[in-house]
Image (spheres, helix red, strand yellow):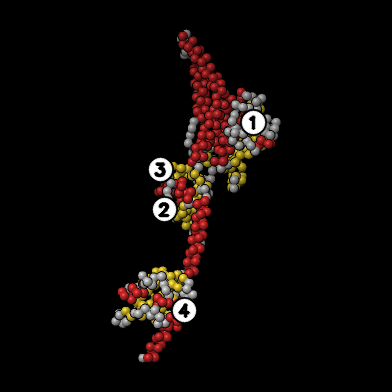
């Protein structure tokens, strides 16, 4: 029996020695009865130094006095799992440890001592502290950024938001984290569509759109317009796990741009007014002549003639002409909400030239249209593009005070670099044979309030507005000009991609 006990003891000692975690046992008097190699390594004490000593005189844990878990286990038999404590090693250094305590019992279930397993958390704590420092540093970077930064998980819940994001939304960080972004921050009118695109993005069915604008709701229910730059977040297995977006509040800028567009449009209408009045006056004079003739025939009872029929048809045609002229001018001058939709550039050009066509002909300007048939559509706002073209045409007319040629050409331009992208685009060339532009002024043309016109003839916003409109349509505009040899404005607008819309 003694040999069997010795074998068992040796077997148990080998198990204890091979354990990675520190382990020691105590009897009911809190004296240490076993102490494994890992415990020696963690504490710096040798087994021989601690056996039969009170555990609290050796390890001196911060829990020894008031919250001793070993004492509680000895008294109640209750096991304690995965709690943290601080012990002192042989050199007096504090060692953070993760601890589990259990009661030791006889075959009769009598408590005869306790067992404690502990793991050194020093390296883990150091790593966590380093991670915390890096996280805090990253958060500081995010908070310094003067743009909103928002991260969403696969479900669309907010996992990160920076200080600027909280300021724009009007909430504290803890009020936003964990909330569903679409239910919390997207207006009801666009919520379904935006959520649908996000879910397709998370499923890998569509590609991320790097730049876009959409409204958000802030505290109090007000809508703000945000321009977003987005990227996909992936895990180490390259699986999509969310999105990271930076956003800039452009609400006030959009309002300013809208007012600028409105004021410049009204200025253009003012320039057109005289020509339109003259154009409307001619058919009205003709109508008045025919009405007088018809009244005379009425008095002579000679209305039922073929000539009368033709005169009535002329009245109808001239009246319709006046109506078209006025309608075109009203359509151009009206204030409309910006709406991006498929646009046929040829129709925009025809609508523009229908307003100014008669006026430029009065200035002895010959208009030539070289419009390519069946051009692909672009994604844009009809009214804004018309305003840009109108401003360029009016500038061209003013550059030819003694008459000249105005040529409008459209074509498809392949693989054009616009910004950071290379794409196919519609090209619109508006060329005049006017006075031209000095080279030193070419780079200033799109600068607000820059003008070479006489005082009272313009404030220098027309081409600035044109540049803004083309930029908002993710296009570009180029100018070629030589003094005395005319000017060509070339506009490039990306072709609508049906696969992405």
Q: Secondary structure under badge 1?
A: loop
The residue tagged 1 is 452
**Which of the marked residues, 1 or 4, is nearer the chain's N terminus?**
4
**Badge 3 is on which residue?**
221
Residue that label 4 marks: 45
Q: How crowded is mark 4: few (under 14 residues within 10 Å), some or many (20 or more)?
A: some
Disc number lying in front (4 or 2)? 4
Seen from the viewer's position, the closer of residues 179 and 286 is 179
Q: Residues within 10 Å of mark 3 (few under 14, many from 20)?
A: few
Residue 53 against residue 180 in the figure, above or below = below
Badge 2: residue crowd in 10 Å (few <14, some 14–19, many ≥20): few
Mark 1 or 3 closer to N-term? Answer: 3
The quadrant the N terminus occupies is bottom left
Find residue 405 and report its horizontal and vertical position in percent: 65, 29
Q: Distance between the residues labelled 4 and 2?
A: 47 Å
Separation of disc 2 and disc 3 at Cα? 19 Å
């Amino acid at each position: 029996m003694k040999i069997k006990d010795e074998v068992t003891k040796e077997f148990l000692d080998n198990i204890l020695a091979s354990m990675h975690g520190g382990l020691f046992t105590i009897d009911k008097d809190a004296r240490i009865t076993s102490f494994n190699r890992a415990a020696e390594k963690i504490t710096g004490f040798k087994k021989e130094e601690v056996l039969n000593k009170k555990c609290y005189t050796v390890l001196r844990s911060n829990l020894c006095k008031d919250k001793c878990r070993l004492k509680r286990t000895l008294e109640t038999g209750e096991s304690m799992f995965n709690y943290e404590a601080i012990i002192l090693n042989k050199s007096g250094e504090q060692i953070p440890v993760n601890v589990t305590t259990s009661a030791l019992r006889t075959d009769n279930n009598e408590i005869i001592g306790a067992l404690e397993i502990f793991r050194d958390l020093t390296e883990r704590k150091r790593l966590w502290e380093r991670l915390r420092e890096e996280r805090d540093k990253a958060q500081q970077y995010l908070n310094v950024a003067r743009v909103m930064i928002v991260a969403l998980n696969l479900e669309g819940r907010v996992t990160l938001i920076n200080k600027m994001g909280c300021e724009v939304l009007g909430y504290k960080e803890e009020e936003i984290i964990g909330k569903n972004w679409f239910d919390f921050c997207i207006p009801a009118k666009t919520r379904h569509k935006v959520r649908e695109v996000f879910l397709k993005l998370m499923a890998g069915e569509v590609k991320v759109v790097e730049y876009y604008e959409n409204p958000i709701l802030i505290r109090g229910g007000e809508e703000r317009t945000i321009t977003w730059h987005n990227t996909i977040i992936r895990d180490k297995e390259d699986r999509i796990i969310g999105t990271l977006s930076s956003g800039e509040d452009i609400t006030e800028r959009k309002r300013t741009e809208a007012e600028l567009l409105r004021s410049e449009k009204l200025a253009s209408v003012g320039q057109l007014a005289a020509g339109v009045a003259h154009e409307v006056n001619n058919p009205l004079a003709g109508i008045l002549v025919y009405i007088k003739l018809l009244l005379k025939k009425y008095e002579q009872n000679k209305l039922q003639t073929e000539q009368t029929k033709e005169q009535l048809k002329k009245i109808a045609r001239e009246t319709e002409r006046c109506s078209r002229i006025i309608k075109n001018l009203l359509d151009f001058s009206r204030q409309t909400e910006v709406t991006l939709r498929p646009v046929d550039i040829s129709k925009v050009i025809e609508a523009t030239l229908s307003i100014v066509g008669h006026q430029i002909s009065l200035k002895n300007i010959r208009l030539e249209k070289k419009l390519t048939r069946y051009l692909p559509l672009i994604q844009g706002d009809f009214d804004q593009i018309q305003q840009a073209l109108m401003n360029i045409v009016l500038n061209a007319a003013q550059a030819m005070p003694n008459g000249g040629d105005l040529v409008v050409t459209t074509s498809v331009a392949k693989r054009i670099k616009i910004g950071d992208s290379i794409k196919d685009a519609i090209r619109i060339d508006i060329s005049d044979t006017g006075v031209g532009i000095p080279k030193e002024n070419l780079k200033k043309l799109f600068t607000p309030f820059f003008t070479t016109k006489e005082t009272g003839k313009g404030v220098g916003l027309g081409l600035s507005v044109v540049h803004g409109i083309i930029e908002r349509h993710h296009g570009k505009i180029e100018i070629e000009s030589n003094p005395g040899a005319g000017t060509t404005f070339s506009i490039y607008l990306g072709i609508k991609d049906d696969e992405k819309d």
